Structure formats: structure tokens, C-alpha cells
Amino acid sequence: MFDFRYHALSLAAVLIALAVGLLLGVAIGDANLVSNAETRVVNGLRSSADAASDQASALRTQLAFRNQFESAAYPQLVGGRLPAGRIGLVFLGSPSDEANAAVRSALETTGAQVAVVAVVRDPPNLASVAAAAETDRYAAVASNPALVRPFGVRVGVQLVTGGQLLAKVATPLLSTYNGTLEPKGGLTGVVVMRAPSTASGATLAVQTAFEDGLAAGLAGSGVPVVGAELSTTDPSEIPWYQQQNLSSVDDIDDTAGRTALVEVLAGAAGSYGRKSTATSGLLPTAIPAHP
């Protein structure tokens, strides 16, 4: 006859063996599950990476075709658009070689050329300007703030048409001035590129008054004027152009931006480009017919 304690111990041993067996089975099963899950994840990631690589390759091919198309189509879009045009490029503050190249590239097949490049000092040295103005009324511009904006207006007009005042003050006012204005006709269009200012206080007030006046003079000269910048320009100067009632293009480093630039110089109006300030869209909705 078995002793009850022996029976109880045997039962406990059986139960422990069953528990250990269950734990081992679960552990082995879990290991297989984990291994299978890892394999599925790795295979899934590899498949996704291969698909992404294929998609990127397809997109690169599409982009290459698009660039080829734009390069071929651009001359047909703007060819002869600005016959005998004489365009002025005016930098307010620091000039940009990239922007200069973009404007010249935009005009290559249009029949127009960059006739004048002017870089306005930032801020203008009014004392030197006043001394150069001699007996002109603007000889007092350094001591009379009320003359700063009217002085800017007159300079803006004469950047398009030429004039004695600009000839006198060009050296102290402009850090660079290349090109000549024809005695008759002057410029047929102007591209303005404004750089962010680091001035403050009274100096900033003088600079703002002068630049506002210059923009008004350019706009009132009777030729198309467009404020332009690169798509990478930050901060954007488009709001300032809009405040001055100038048309604008915010992506002249792109084919669409160069097309918009030419169309504005041909007579279209609005704010074009890819930024949120491009209230008129990417391009003029109806490009005027060629002459």
C-alpha cells in the first residue's frame, strides 16, 4: 500500500514535469515564431527597398525627359518674344552671380539683351551723393530727409531713360554700373533684385525711403518692371515687390520662372512662381501672341 505522502510527492513531480515541458514547448515555439517574424520583416523591408529603388530610377528617368523637353521647348516658347529689347538689371544691395546668369539665360533667344547692370549701394551714402549732385536740388539730400524718396524716384526714372542727375551721382550711389543707355529710347524693361538689408534705425529708414522711391520711379517710367528672385531665396523679397505694385517672379532659376520673366517683360502683369506669394500662379494664364 502506497504512503499518502509518497503519492503526493509523485503527483507534484508529475505536475512539475508537465509545467517544465509546457514552458520548454512554448519557448521553442516562441523562438520559431520570432525567427519567422524576423524573416518576414526582413523580406518585407527588402521588397520595399527594391520597389523604392525602382520607383526612384523611374522618376529620375522621367525628370531627365522633362528637362530635355523643357530645354527643347523653351526657345520655341520665348524665341523672338522681345525683339531688340534692352533690359536693365538692377540689384538693390548685394548682387548675385546666379541670378545674373539666370536673367541672361532667360533672354538668350528672345531678341533682347541685358544692356545695363546697376548695383545700388546698401545703404546709399547720401553725403557723397549730395556732394556729387553739385548745384542740383538734391545737393541737400543728406540734410533733408524729405528729399530722399523724391531723389529715389528721379534715379529710378533715369535708370530707364538716362539723365544728368544719374550721370553725376552714379559713382557714389552705385557700386557697379555696366552698360550704356541709348540717347533715344533707353531701356525697354527692367528686372529688379533686392537683397535683404542688415541696416537698422535711421539708416534703415533712409534706405527704405530711397528704395521705395526708386521702385516708384521705375514703375512710372512706362516700361515693364519685374521684381525677381531665385526659388531658394530666403527670406523672400516678393512681398516688397508687391507692396511697390511691381510684377514678380520667384523662381527664375527654373524654366517656368524664366518663361514667366520673359512674359512679364513682354507686358503680362502679376505675381508668378511656386511660392505662396505667387498669387497669379505659375505662368500667365494667357500668354500673348508673338509679334
Image (cartoon, rainbow, N blue to C red):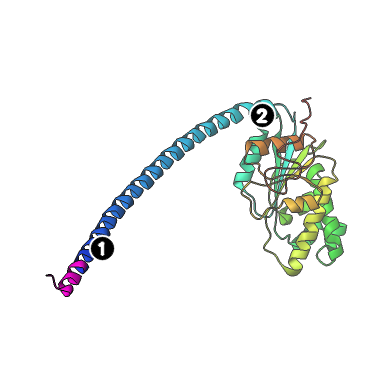
Q: Residues within 10 Å of mark 1 (few under 14, many from 20)?
A: few
Residue 130: percent from the left, percent from the top? Answer: 80, 61
Secondary element at tag 1: helix
| Main SS, magenta residues | helix
Q: Does residue 121 appear left or right of residue 151 in this picture?
A: left
Check the picture and name the quadrant holding the N terminus: bottom left
Q: Position of residue 258 (x, y in %)?
A: 67, 37
Asked if residue 165 can be seen in this view, the reply is: no
**Which dot marks residue 19?**
1
Asked if residue 10 is among those painted magenta in the image, a careful observer would answer yes
Q: Is residue 120 visible?
A: yes
Q: Position of residue 45 (x, y in %)?
A: 40, 45
Q: Is the C-beta separation of discs 1 and 2 under 8 Å?
A: no
* Total labels drawn: 2
**Quarter occupied by the C terminus:** top right
Hey, what amino acid is under mark 2?
Answer: Thr
Q: Is residue 2 left or right of residue 168?
A: left
Q: Which residues are magenta?
A: 1-11
Residue tagged by mark 2? Answer: 109
Crowd band around label 2 with a 10 angstrom C-alpha radius: few (<14), some (14–19), many (20+): some
Q: Residue at x 68, y 53 (%)?
A: 236
